[in-house]
Each structure stands twice: as C-alpha cells, then as structure tokens.
Amino acid sequence: MKIKVVYLASLREQLGKSGEDLEIAPATSTVAGLRALLMARGGAWQAALAQGRALRVAVNQEMAQPTTPVKPGDEIAFFPPVTGG
Amino acid sequence: MAVRIQTKDFDAGAEITALRRGNPKIGAVASFIGVCRDASDGTAVTKMTLEHYPGMTEKALEKIVAEAKARWDVMEVLVVHRVGELKPTDQIVLVVVTGAHRGEAFAACEFIMDYLKTRAPFWKKEETPQGARWVEARASDDEAAQRWEPPKSSAA
C-alpha cells in the first residue's frame, strides 16, 4: 500500500529528508511497524528512530500511538516532542 | 478565524478590540503573550527559528480551543502563533479569551497555553554563540499540561 511519511524539525535534519512516498507491505499495519521498517534501513535511521528516543507520531495530522493503524493513503509524521509557545 | 499561524508580528490591542467587537456581554478579557528571550539555559540566544507542521498545527490548535470552550464558560478565543525567524524581544504567541467573568477567562487562557506547549506541532531552533541547537521539550511543560487532565477515578 502507498503511504506518505513526513519528518520534521531535528528528525528531518538527522535523516536528511523532509518526507517520502512509500510503498509498504500491508502487513506493516501500525505506527510501530512502520518505525521498525524505517529503522531497518540502518545508519542515521536506526539511530534517530531507536526505541528510547523521545519521538512523537501523527497519523493524518492527529497525534498517534505505536498501536495506531496505518492504512493506504495515510500521512504519517515523525517528530520530536514539541517546543512552541 | 480563532487560530492563525503567521510570520508577521501581531498587535495585541487591535486583536482584542476586534475580538470584543463592542459585545456588551463581555465582562473579562484574559490574554497571554509569549516573547522571545535573549538567553535560555544560561546560553545567549541571538535568534530563533520556529518551524511547524502546516495542516496539523491549525487542527491541533482548533482542537485545543474547542476543548477550552467546552470546559469553561467563555465567549471568544483567539490564538495567533508566529513562525519563521524571530529575535529576542519579538512576540511569539498571543492567546486572548473573552467571557463574562475573569475566573473562567483566566483558566481557559492558561489551559490553552499549557496544551499548546505540549500538543501543537511547533519546534524552536536557537542560534547561540556555540552554534544552532534545537530546543528540548521540558518536563515542566508536561507537568503544567497534566494539571488540566480530568481527575482519575480512584480504583474501588
């Protein structure tokens, strides 16, 4: 299935990428599954997305959890904890 | 529009006047302005860049405003947040809440800021004499937001 992935703020800098369109196996059906898939790229991906790193995820621009489902056409954004205001 | 993201500065007086629109039911106007400081964590800050997640930012702020309106008896709410490059003394964010009485307006205004700090997708990058650095989220901001969580029902 096709999805859109977005990387923001310090995570974008660590990955050297602001986003990408991905074709993933339907079995990668949750946020946690997608994170694991991206980490498997190794290098900066492994380091920046490692468990224990404070990361937030939004699915279709709503805050999400590791268990949130990922469906075809979804926009999944990874970013650090927010610091506005 | 209750929520605005913009690069340009804002005029709090003009915004408040517009929000009140001469409404004689309003007895209280509570407002907050967040301002860029020249230092953080003991390091000089010469400039900062505010980044956001267009689309989600507006939705997240609108949700916070809707929740504030549901929890307190207030009338109008305005949130203006700037993005892009800001210097010390520049205004960053404006929250205005109008209502019949000050208690509800103060509480809603503080709630909106506490939730904005922990739930709206903005990130600050500071320029310091040692180079640029992304601002780290603070535990104290999470604690401030948690004050507003509904009390947990005690397990019987």
Image (tube, coloured by chain):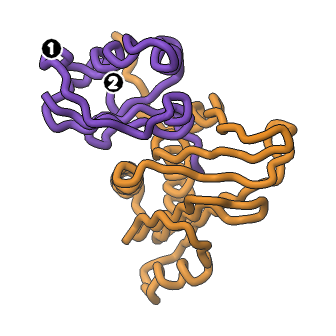
Mark earlier in primary sequence (1, 2):
1
Q: Nearer the viewer, residue B130 or A31?
A: B130
Q: Which chain is orange?
A: B
Q: Nearer the viewer, residue A42 or B40?
A: A42
Mark yes or no: residue B146 visible: no
Q: Colour of chain A?
A: purple
- Callout 1 secondary element: loop
Q: Which residue shows up at 40% across the image and 61% down it?
A: B73
Q: Is residue A7 above or below residue B126?
A: above
| Label 1 to label 2: alpha-carbon separation | 17 Å
Chain on which label 2 sits? A
Where is residue A52? Give x, y as percent: 52, 12
Above or below residue B131? Residue B24 is: below
Q: Residues within 10 Å of mark 1 (few under 14, many from 20)?
A: few
Report the amino acid beneath label 2.
Gln
Q: Secondary structure at mark 2?
A: loop
Q: Chain of mark 1?
A: A
Q: Are marks 1 and 2 in contact (CB under 8 Å)?
A: no
Residue B28 lies in what quarter of the image?
Answer: bottom right
Residue at (46%, 46%) from the top-left corner? B120
Q: Position of residue B45 (x, y in %)?
A: 80, 49
Residue topped by disc 2: A65
Identify which residue is drawn at 32% across, 30% down.
A64
The residue type indicated by label 1 comes to: Ala
Residue shown at 83% from the left, 38% from the top: B130
Task: From the image, tell me which residue sits under label 1.
Answer: A27
What mark, if any, has residue B114 been given in the picture?
A: none
